[in-house]
Image (spheres, rainbow, N blue to C red):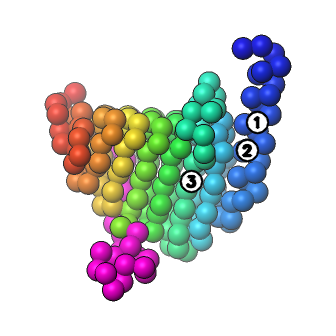
């Protein structure tokens, strides 16, 4: 890649990062992650970034062209992202109660974490927001592959690996590889 192309790429990425900072309305943000990809921070709750959090992959800024979305919906909602966490492009968290990601976690592209169902299943209430939620906890040194969905109430134990395309709807113990829909333990590490 030539110098002119690198400059254009850098300008494109930085303009998008600035745009999404401007559009973000979450007033309770603690810490400053290293941004290599646009991030939209929304909601009335708290979003905490510990030291050395990286969002986006610098070598592929056009990969999953979009943005990372984090919403701490209510005053009591809290998203806590530990130290040395690396999050790939097109990641989202929708948090009604609490989402905790501990230290040294790697998260692949196009992953989603939700601590709530979003809407009721009952046809009469389906257009209403469903505030029923259960916290999500991701332990230290977890590696989450691309295109993974993590649903409400899930705990993923430390040192575990979640395979690409998995839907994690139940707890995953520590030191295992889990994959599938729904995610199941494949083997111990």
- Splitting the image into 4 quarters, where does residue 178 fall? top left
Residues drawn in magenta: 118-141
Q: Earlier in the sequence, mark 2 or mark 3?
A: 2
Q: Is residue 135 visible?
A: no
Distance from the alpha carbon under mark 3 to that under mark 1: 19 Å
Residue at horizontal 43%, vertical 50%? 112
Q: Is residue 96 magenta?
A: no
125 in relation to 178, above or below: below
Q: Earlier in the sequence, mark 3 or mark 1?
A: 1
**Quadrant where the N terminus is found in the figure:** top right
From the image, tell me which residue sits under label 2: 16
From the image, tell me which residue sits under label 3: 69
Tag nearer the camera, 3 or 1: 1
Q: Secondary structure at mark 2?
A: helix
Mark number for residue 12?
A: 1
In the picture as drawn, the residue positioned furthest to the top comes out as 2
Residue at horizontal 66%, vertical 45%? 38
* Residue 188 located left or right of residue 5: left
162 in relation to 30, above or below: above
Q: Is there CB contact under 8 Å for labels 2 and 1?
A: yes
Q: Secondary structure at mark 3?
A: strand
Could you classify mark 2 by the number of other residues whose Cα lies within 10 Å: few (under 14), some (14-19), or many (20 or more)? some
Q: Is residue 135 magenta?
A: yes
**Quadrant where the C terminus is found in the figure:** top left
């Amino acid at each position: 890649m030539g110098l002119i192309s690198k400059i254009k790429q850098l300008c494109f990425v930085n303009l998008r990062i600035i745009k999404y900072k401007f559009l973000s309305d979450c007033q309770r943000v603690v810490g400053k992650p290293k941004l290599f990809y646009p991030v939209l921070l929304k909601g009335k709750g708290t979003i905490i970034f510990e030291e050395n959090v990286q969002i986006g992959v610098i070598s592929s800024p056009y990969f999953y062209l979009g943005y990372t979305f984090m919403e701490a919906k209510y005053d009591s909602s809290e998203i806590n992202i530990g130290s040395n966490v690396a999050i790939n492009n097109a990641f989202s968290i929708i948090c009604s109660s609490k989402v905790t990601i501990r230290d040294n976690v790697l998260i692949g592209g196009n992953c989603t974490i939700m601590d709530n169902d979003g809407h009721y299943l009952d046809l009469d209430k389906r257009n209403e927001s469903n505030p029923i939620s259960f916290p999500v906890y991701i332990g230290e040194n977890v590696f989450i592959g691309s295109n993974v969905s993590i649903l409400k109430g899930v705990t993923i134990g430390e040192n575990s690996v979640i395979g690409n395309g998995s839907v994690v709807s139940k707890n995953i113990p520590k030191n295992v590889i889990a994959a599938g829909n729904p995610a199941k333990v494949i083997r111990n590490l």
